[in-house]
Amino acid sequence: MHRNKRRTKSNINRYLVSLVLGAVFLLLVVNAPYNARSSATNIPEFPEEIVYHAHADFKVFVNNKELDFSSPEFNIRSRQIHLHSDNDFGGNVIHVEEREATLGEFFSSLGMKFNFTCFIIDSEFCNTETKTLKFYVNGERNNENDKYKPKDLDRILISYGDKDEDINGQLDSITKLACVFSNKCPIPGNVKIVTL
């Protein structure tokens, strides 16, 4: 009887050890793709529903003059939607870290205002009989303006100027670097970009 108790206890111990080893093995197999991606880039990856991270190229023109957003004063002014102006071309790419973040919130964090009729910096640039505020996403007119939620790889143009001005040159000047920050294309040679 004493021997049966010892044998039963030994069987339970072997069963528990097998169960623990099986669970560890299962965790390793399930996490293998995640571990491979993370170690390759040294950047932890999270499911999109936990962390949202998108990048959009953008330009703003007022009376056919491009506004410069590369100044350190514009660097990471909001957690949800911001610039990394310390990068080469960092003033041309919006970093979006909250799915519901809007362009209105972005410009507000920079001390500016953008809505359906005006772009306000130090001065107001509002629609008149001869000048209008135009908003484009990926080459197409868009009417969401400040409510627009930038998506990954968007190319955004805000332009205030003559109603009949040709803005094709402005559209063509928008960089295509959002893909670098989103790790979807290589970094161009001799360009300093931190993609975190």
Image: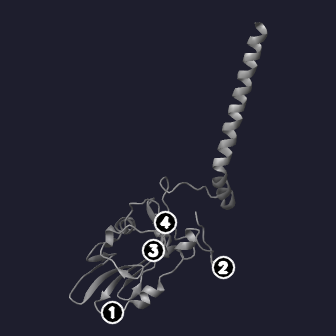
Badge 3 is on which residue?
154
Which of the two residues, 152 or 97, is positioned nearer the viewer here?
152
The residue carrying pointer 3 sits among few (fewer than 14), some (14 to 19) or many (20 or more) residues within 10 Å by Cα, namely many
Mark 3 vs 2: CB contact within 8 A: no
The mark closer to the camera, 3 or 2, is: 3
Q: Say which amino acid is labelled 4.
A: Ala
Badge 1 is on which residue?
165
Tell me the SS state at disc 4: strand
Task: Look at the image and tell me in which quarter the C terminus lies.
Answer: bottom right
Please tell me which of labels 3 and 4 falls first in the chain: 4
Tell me the SS state at disc 3: loop
Task: Look at the image and tell me in which quarter the N terminus lies.
Answer: top right
Image quadrant where residue 170 sits: bottom left
Q: Does 44 sit above or below residue 125?
A: above
Q: In this view, which residue lies farthest toward the right?
A: 3
Badge 4 is on which residue?
54
Residue 43 x %, y %: 62, 58
- Gap between marks 1 and 2, in whole Å? 35 Å
Badge 2 is on which residue?
190
Q: Say which amino acid is labelled 3.
A: Asp
Residue at left 73%, top 17%? 9
- Gap between marks 3 and 1, in whole Å? 23 Å
Q: Say which amino acid is labelled 2.
A: Asn
- Gap between marks 3 and 4, in whole Å? 9 Å
Would you say residue 70 is visible in this rendering?
no
Residue at left 47%, top 86%? 173
The mark closer to the camera, 2 or 4, is: 4
Tell me the SS state at disc 1: loop
Mark 3 vs 4: CB contact within 8 A: yes
Please state if 3 lies on the left or on the right of 87 as rendered. right
